[in-house]
Amino acid sequence: MFLCSLASLLQAAPLPVITSFSILGDVTRQIGGERVQVRSLIGNDQDAHMYQLVSKDLRDMRSARLILLNGLGLEPLSLQRAAQQSRVPLATVTQGIQPLMMADDGHHHHQQTDPHIWNDPVLMQTYARNVAGALIKVDPQGKAYYQQRLAAYQRQLAELNNWATKIFNAVPADKRKVLTGHDAFAYMAKRYSIQFIAPQGVSTEAEPSARQVAAIISQIRRENIKAIFIENIKNPKMVQRIASETQTKISGRLYSDALSNGAPAATYIDMFRFNVNALAAAMK
């Protein structure tokens, strides 16, 4: 009897899961293992803020068994609506996480939630738990398997935080200042006491005004900020301009909202390690 049930488990086709973007796709694979087949609508090196829904995405959503969204305004409304209308079980993985609030790119006085939870590996433990919970709900037979993989992943996330804390603590507090293209690193800033400056707000769509750029340039000169980064999802022109005006060398690129194809940021944990190492080296 046991062998029959084992054989049927091995033959079960993997669960088709749609995730909105590559980082969430990776977390889902880490927890889902062989029981899931994950497709991310917004792929590696792609900008979630600029995503356009296509008919293949709609078809894939309708044939999935589960759709996972980040939430907190990361996904465009078109994608949120399509996910709700697909009639497929849908989960938002930032549930139960207290988001940071950000001023909305300087044009309006209202605030918006910051969706970039993944820049804090401590909050990612809740995020991962939500992914596991959503998988168990649609695939209860896999409960023990998912829980085991979740526990292993939680340990990796805890180690990641301990390691990052040591790395950043080795950088003098007054040197922990960085310029990036858009405001994606507030959770990292809060967790590890780093000051991030960005010409663009939370979304990469908003263009900074000439006055904002001038203010950043004078801040870099005044505070002697050495760490200036471009991002994998963004046109680097604005950061390049600021770097040349302040005669600062660009320190490299960070992976902000998307994984890379292959190294150095093929998984969420690889991405976080790469960013921490790059930031610490540039700030010292």
Image (cartoon, helix red, strand yellow):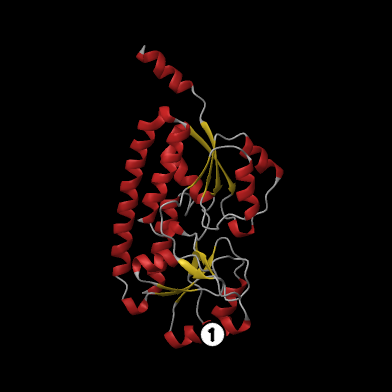
Number of other residues with Cα within 10 Å of mark 1, as a class: few under 14, some 14 to 19, many 20 or more: few
Depth check, front residue: 151 or 243: 151
The quarter of the image holding the C terminus is: bottom left
Residue at (28% x, 64% y) in the render:
166
Q: Is residue 234 above or below residue 144?
A: below
Q: Is residue 235 visible?
A: yes
Quarter residue 206 falls in: bottom right
Secondary structure beneath label 1: helix
Q: Depth check: give the residue in front, 62 or 166.
A: 62
In the image: residue 62, left or right of residue 282: right
Viewer-closest of 249 and 101? 101
Given residues 44 and 188, the one toward you in this image is 188
Compared across the picture, whether 13 is left or right of 31 comes to right
Residue 19 image offset from top left, x and y in percent: 54, 45
Q: Which residue is mark 1?
A: 215
Expressed as whole percent of the image width and height from the top left, the position of residue 55 reads: 71, 43
Q: Residue at x 62, y 82 (%)?
A: 210
The amino acid type of the residue labelled 1 equals Ala
